[in-house]
Image: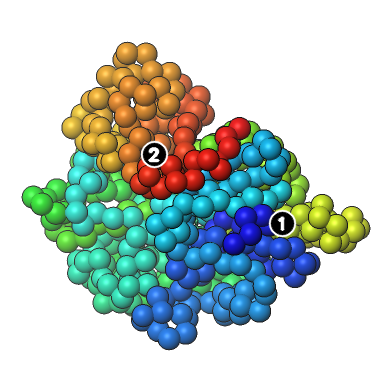
């Protein structure tokens, strides 16, 4: 295989597919990479071929249109392929993407890289959050929609935002007994009213929301505003949850505590953008207050502070599939112009739709914020870094030794050094540090990162080490 191309797109969700298709349409030579076997990402995830001959997507006409466009083009699609590093080749002056496929590590170079790696579930740590039977909303959705498996028979959902409504509806429709949905966001009605003009015109989303509400009403599911799970109990798996009403700051009101028997707890505290690659190559990052996380700085064409590296879709900030696909078109227009396939006056400026989608994304982030008090539910023995089994007491000890940032905590305790590379514990550590030192989460900074970004056997890297050139 030729190891040079015009454009490499990492991630075949709505953003990545749209980017690859638009670029190929202009004549740009594109390689699209995804770790899954089928394109679609999270929202347009396809049911595995083993379940259905067509690899059909249960949810979206738009998705099926994108898939058929993808088939029509000459795009090279590398499925079951995980990118583990991006490097700058000082000799060729091109960006180099290192990936693992069929157990072999290879690399591909291009002047332009579009990173469209999406997002993953945001977690908070509370006693019992690591018990079997406690899982995130995204994981539960994958089990139901893509594997046809119910995560449990008697289920409670706790968290914030529309994703958990969708998950609760999916669970109820699939036959689970959903004993309740707890929304930790406080003052939702007040916040929601001030954002009414933003919701106006979003008919498709509203219809989707009404569909979920109808399913929940039909199944008589209780929806509690200003409540949260505070503890999960069980011997070898979750058997009981303790829930409580919370105040404006997210602190549980003791007198309101209730216990419920369940066999599955689904937690959905929103999503976290996958920013690993931007941190790896030292893109400038900026703090997003609404999402309480660092995201890459971008210009009007979605280009990061590093020339040739673009960030689109949820990995640059949670915005949903529509915004992701708009950003894809904007970025690829710019790249097509840079490669001489388009003149400057042909560059797309869909600023009206872009602003509408950005406003909607901001509204969701502002309405469904996680109150800080929920980050203080863990007790000294609660595991914070699940991969390295680091307890809250050890994290606090590291802070008492003088840790000033989440990276300091990582260096002292090994938190964030394990299989998930801090994807789960990173933001929890930032909140603990902020609480313990009286500083802001922004001041806790973000976890630094080293290749390989995703775990792989070291001999696979050695096979190719002669060709990987670091900055
Ligand atoms: C678990 C989950 C469930 C969701 N459910 C809903 C829902 O029900 N309704 C809704 O409106 N929105 C939902 N969303 C949000 C919605 O999916 C996103 O807003 C939308 O898909 C964004 O598209 P994207 O292309 O930016 O990212 P994604 O769709 O997340 O696609 C990213 C792709 O990048 C690939 N990837 C990541 N890292 C690598 C790597 N290193 N190497 C190779 N490939 C890589 C992934 O496999 C994935 O296919 C969900 C999000 C998540 C995370």
- The residue nearer to you, when weighing 85 against 320, is 85
Q: Position of residue 362 (x, y in %)?
A: 60, 49
- Label 2 crowd (10 A; few <14 / some 14-19 / many >=20): many
- The tally of labels here is 2
Residue at the image position 86 percent from the left and 61 percent from the top: 342
In this view, 2 is above or below 255:
below
Sequence order check: which comes first, mark 1 or mark 2?
A: 1
Horizontally, is 78 left or right of 299 in the view? Answer: left
Disc 2 within 8 angstroms of ligand 1 (CB): no
Quickly name the residue at label 1: 6
Q: Quadrant of residue 250?
A: top left
Which label sits on residue 422? Answer: 2
Horizontally, is 366 left or right of 429 in the view? Answer: right
Q: Position of residue 159 (x, y in %)?
A: 36, 52
Which label sits on residue 304? Answer: none
Badge 1 marks a residue whose secondary structure is loop
Q: For marks 1 and 2, give the one nearer the viewer.
A: 1
Disc 1 within 8 angstroms of ligand 1 (CB): no
Task: Give the quarter of the figure containing the N terminus.
Answer: bottom right
Residue at the image position 44 percent from the left and 23 percent from the top: 405
Residue most extreme to the left: 235
Q: Is residue 458 visible?
A: yes
- The residue nearer to you, when weighing 320 against 190, is 320
Badge 2 marks a residue whose secondary structure is loop
Residue at the image position 59 percent from the left and 72 percent from the top: 204
In this view, 370 is above or below 321:
above
In this view, 238 is above or below 124:
below
């Amino acid at each position: 295989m030729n190891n040079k191309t015009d454009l490499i797109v990492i991630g075949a969700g709505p953003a990545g597919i749209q980017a690859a298709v638009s670029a190929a349409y202009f004549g740009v030579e594109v390689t699209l990479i995804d770790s899954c076997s089928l394109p679609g990402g999270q929202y347009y995830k396809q049911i595995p071929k083993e379940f259905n001959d067509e690899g059909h997507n249960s949810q979206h006409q738009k998705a099926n249109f994108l898939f058929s466009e993808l088939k029509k083009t000459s795009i090279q699609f590398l499925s079951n392929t995980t990118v583990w590093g991006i490097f700058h080749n000082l000799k060729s002056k091109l960006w180099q993407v290192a990936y693992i496929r069929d157990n072999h590590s290879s690399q591909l170079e291009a002047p332009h890289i579009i990173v469209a790696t999406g997002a993953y579930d945001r977690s908070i740590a509370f006693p019992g959050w690591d018990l079997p039977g406690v899982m995130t909303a995204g994981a539960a959705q994958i089990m139901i929609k893509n594997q046809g498996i119910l995560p449990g028979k008697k289920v409670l959902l706790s968290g914030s935002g529309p994703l958990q409504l969708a998950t609760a509806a999916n669970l109820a429709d699939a036959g689970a007994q959903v004993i309740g949905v707890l929304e930790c966001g406080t003052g939702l009605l007040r916040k929601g009213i001030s954002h009414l003009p933003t919701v106006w015109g979003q008919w498709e989303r509203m219809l989707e929301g009404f569909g979920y509400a109808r399913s929940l009403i039909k199944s008589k599911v209780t929806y509690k505003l200003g409540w949260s799970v505070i503890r999960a109990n069980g011997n070898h798996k979750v058997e009981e949850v303790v829930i409580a009403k919370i105040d404006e700051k997210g602190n549980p009101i003791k007198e309101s505590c209730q216990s419920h028997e369940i066999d599955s707890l689904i937690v959905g505290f929103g999503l976290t953008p996958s920013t690993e690659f931007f941190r790896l190559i030292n893109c400038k990052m900026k703090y997003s207050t609404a999402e309480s996380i660092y995201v890459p700085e971008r210009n009007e064409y979605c280009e990061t502070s590093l020339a040739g590296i673009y960030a689109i879709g949820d990995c640059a900030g949670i915005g949903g599939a529509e915004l992701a696909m708009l950003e894809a078109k904007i970025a690829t227009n710019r790249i097509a112009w840079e490669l001489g396939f388009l003149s400057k006056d042909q560059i797309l400026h869909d600023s009206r739709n872009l602003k509408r989608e950005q406003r909607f994304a901001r509204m969701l982030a502002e309405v469904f914020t996680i109150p800080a008090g929920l980050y203080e539910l863990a007790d000294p023995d609660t595991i914070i870094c699940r991969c390295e089994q680091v307890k809250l007491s050890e994290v606090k000890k590291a802070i008492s030794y003088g840790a000033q940032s989440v990276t300091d905590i990582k260096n002292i305790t090994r938190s964030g050094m394990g299989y998930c590379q801090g994807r789960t514990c990173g933001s929890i550590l930032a909140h603990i540090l902020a609480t313990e030192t009286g500083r802001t989460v922004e001041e806790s900074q973000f976890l630094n990162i080293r290749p390989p970004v995703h775990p792989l056997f070291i001999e696979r890297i050695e096979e190719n080490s002669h060709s990987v050139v670091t900055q």
